Amino acid sequence: MKKQLLLFLLILSVIPVFGQYTLLNEENNSSINDGDIITVSVNNFTTHVILTNTGTFPVKATLEATDIVNTDGSELNFCFGFHGEGDCHMGIVTNTVYNSNEHGTTYLAPGQATAHTDIDFTHIDNATAHPDYPKDYVLKLTVINANDDTVVGETNFTYRYQPQGDISTDLAKNDITIATGYHVLNIISGYHADITIYNLTGQKVKEVHLKPSQNHIYTGNMSPGIYLVHVKADDKEFYKKVVLK
């Protein structure tokens, strides 16, 4: 009887330690609970998810997309790692486990919160290739005891992209085409057009106003990589992801 009581008390002493972590959506300062949906309505909008360790031991974490709806995963870019030491991924694949701090040496210590780059999501809409909405990424965050690899807890949440208003997705029908060339972005438009180019971190790298007779934007001073081109013309908005080499 004494052994059973001792075992029961031991279990009680362990239970409060497990599950002691919190997730916070930095954009609106709201907590993220199991089953919650984070809805983003503006393209190229970044949501920072902050993990806070309220337990008594260091933790590590994994992230996995258990389901993806109305897209193939290529539109969601994210950085994952404590204190900015993790990797950034251009696209997410279902049933692939992404580890925090893959190239870092530290874990999240007790009583410590991650920097805002812990889970840094950016959705870049490719409405031409994936025209259906909402675009859902069902994610599972697993928090693990860094000392013995036991699971502290799991939080399942959905990152959802649902644009507001009427966004036209057929560029050709609106007399606008976009193509890349050597150190140049070719944009053919029958209208005056305001062009804004963003990199994958959401930073604006170039802004140009084109007249109908103009169609070249010099990109030789931009680093190779993936960019989002936002075109506003004739009271319509268009988005296209381009690759500069």
Image: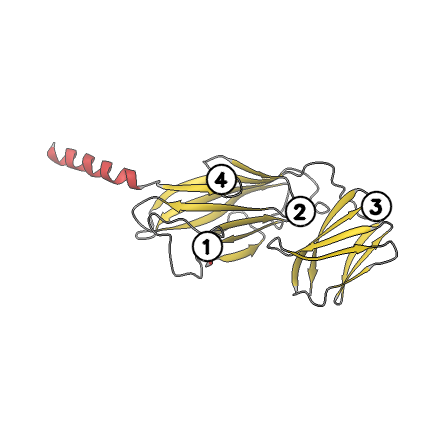
Query: Badge 1 is on which residue?
Result: 81
Q: Distance between the residues labelled 2 and 4?
A: 25 Å
Query: Badge 2 is on which residue?
Result: 125
Give the amino acid type for the residue marked by disc 4 in the picture: Asn
Name which of mark 2 and mark 3 comes first in the sequence.
Answer: 2
Question: Mark 2, residues whose alpha carbon is within 10 Å: few (<14), some, or many (≥20)?
Answer: many
User: Is 31 above or below relative to 226?
Assistant: above
Query: In percent of the image, x 46 and y 41: which residue is there?
Result: 24
Q: Distance between the residues labelled 2 and 3?
A: 18 Å
Give the amino acid type for the residue marked by disc 3 in the picture: Asn
- Say what secondary structure mark 2 lies in: loop
> Mark 3–mark 1 contact, CB under 8 Å?
no
Q: Distance between the residues labelled 4 and 3?
A: 40 Å
**Horizontal and vertical percent position of residue 80:** 49, 53
Name which of mark 2 and mark 4 comes first in the sequence.
Answer: 4
- Say what secondary structure mark 3 lies in: helix
**Horizontal and vertical percent position of residue 29:** 49, 39
- Say what secondary structure mark 4 lies in: loop
Name which of mark 3 and mark 1 comes first in the sequence.
Answer: 1
User: Is 35 above or below relative to 195?
Assistant: above
Query: In percent of the image, x 79 and y 54: which residue is there?
Result: 209
Please state which of residues 68 and 238 is positioned toward the viewer in this rendering.
Answer: 238
Name which of mark 4 and mark 1 comes first in the sequence.
Answer: 4
Query: Badge 4 is on which residue?
Result: 29
Query: Badge 3 is on which residue?
Result: 174
Question: Mark 4, residues whose alpha carbon is within 10 Å: few (<14), some, or many (≥20)?
Answer: few
